[in-house]
Amino acid sequence: MVDVVYARGPHWSTMNINIFPSPNDMDKLEGLCGTFNGNYRDDLLDSYGNITHVDSSRWTSYPDNFSASWG
C-alpha cells in the first residue's frame, strides 16, 4: 500500500510518501525503504553494503552518502 500526503501552507509545501510492504515481502526487500527484516539497525544499508549511521540533526541534508549510493 502507498499513502501520499501533500500539505501546502502560505510559505512551504511538503510531500510525504509512506510505503507499507505486505507480509509476503518480509526478508525480500532492499534499498531506500530498508530491508524489512525486523531489524531496524540495518534499514540504512547502502547499495555497497555499508550501514549508514545518521545523526538526526543532519538527516535533512540531501543527498547524503546513503541516498547517493542508490542514485
Image (cartoon, grey):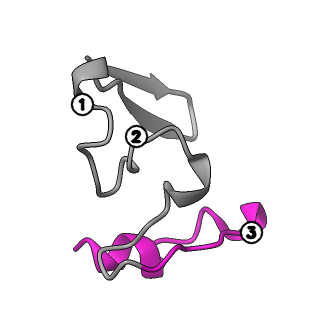
Question: Counting other residues with Cα less than 10 Å from the Cα at mark 3, is it few (<14), some (14-19), or many (20 or more)?
Answer: few
Q: Nearer the viewer, residue 32 or 6?
A: 32
- Helix, strand or loop for the magenta stretch, by majority: loop
Question: Badge 1 local density, few (<14 within 10 Å), some, or many (20+)?
Answer: few
Disc number placed over residue 55 in the picture, else none: 3
| Of pointers 1 and 2, the one earlier in the residue sequence | 1
* Mark 1 touches mark 2? (CB < 8 Å): yes
Q: Is residue 3 magenta?
A: no
Dot 2 falls on a residue whose secondary structure is: loop
The kind of residue on which mark 3 rests is Asp
Q: Label 1 sits on what residue type?
A: Asp
- Please give the residue where the numbered disc 2 appears in the rendered image: 36
x%, y% of residue 70? 26, 71
Q: Nearer the viewer, residue 45 or 14?
A: 45
| Residue nearer the viewer, 33 or 71 | 33
Which image quarter: residue 6?
top left
At x 56%, y 31%, the residue is 10
Q: Which residue occupies 34% across, 55% down? A: 32
Residue 6 lies, with reference to residue 32, above or below; the image says: above
Type of amino acid at the residue the image marks with label 2: Phe
- Distance between mark 1 and mark 3 Cα atoms: 29 Å
